[in-house]
Image (cartoon, rainbow, N blue to C red):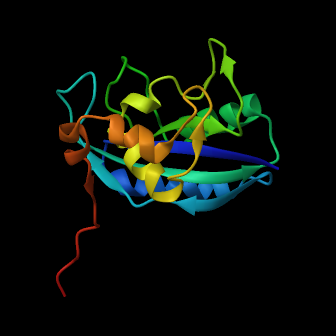
Amino acid sequence: MNKTFIGLGSNIEPRKQYLDQAIEKLNNQPHIHVTKMSSVYETPPVGYIDQRPFLNMVVELEVKLESLQLLAVCQQIETDLDRKRTFENGPRTIDLDILLFNDEYRDLDSLQLPHPRMVERAFVLVPLCEIAPNQIVPTTDKAIEELLLDLPKEDIQEIIRWEEPRHKA
């Protein structure tokens, strides 16, 4: 059994529904079991900033797949949920990024592990720290909570726990 962490993000409505559908599709795979889920956080866009805020979260999975097989599953889920890759860092219905896969290191065109920019991104480290604060990132030999402390405070303050709006009775 392999342990992996997946970052999920969406900034096209219905954002929360896309996150929920992606998790359901992951859990419905015969060789994947969702073991932990972080809270959902609303985060500002990174890179291309002229777009809506994202909802982001991280899930922990136990999988009976290799990392490249998991990548194929994640890409298929993105396709199923109408992900369009119009330009880098652009709006998306859903984004599934493999952040960590056991202690595996890979540097392929199709997959880099650990995710190469995760240690710079508060929108990844905040939800990841919620469910796995002591998880070591192999390329840094630091725990997630240590990496989070290395980020600028302003970056962390922009990551707000999101709650689903309550409907009036």
Against 19, residue 84 (above or below) is above
Q: Nearer the viewer, residue 151 or 127?
A: 151
- x and y percentages locating residue 155 in the rendered image: 23, 38
Q: Dividing the picture into quarters, in which one does residue 167 lie?
A: bottom left
Give the residue drawn at x 51%, y 23%.
116
Say whether residue 150 is left or right of residue 159.
right
> For the view shown, which residue lies furthest in the top direction?
109
The total number of labels drawn is: 0
Say whether residue 168 is left or right of residue 143.
left
Q: Is residue 165 visible?
A: yes
Q: Dividing the picture into quarters, in which one does residue 163 lie?
A: bottom left
- x and y percentages locating residue 124 in the rendered image: 41, 41
Against 47, residue 152 (above or below) is below
Q: Is residue 9 visible?
A: no
> For the view shown, which residue lies furthest in the bottom direction?
169
Give the residue drawn at x 54%, y 54%.
132
Give the residue drawn at x 52%, y 60%.
37
Where, quadrant-wise, is the C terminus in this rendering?
bottom left
- x and y percentages locating residue 87 in the rendered image: 36, 17
Q: Dividing the picture into quarters, in which one does residue 149 lie?
A: top left
Q: Nearer the viewer, residue 95 or 128?
A: 128
- x and y percentages locating residue 77 in the rendered image: 59, 41
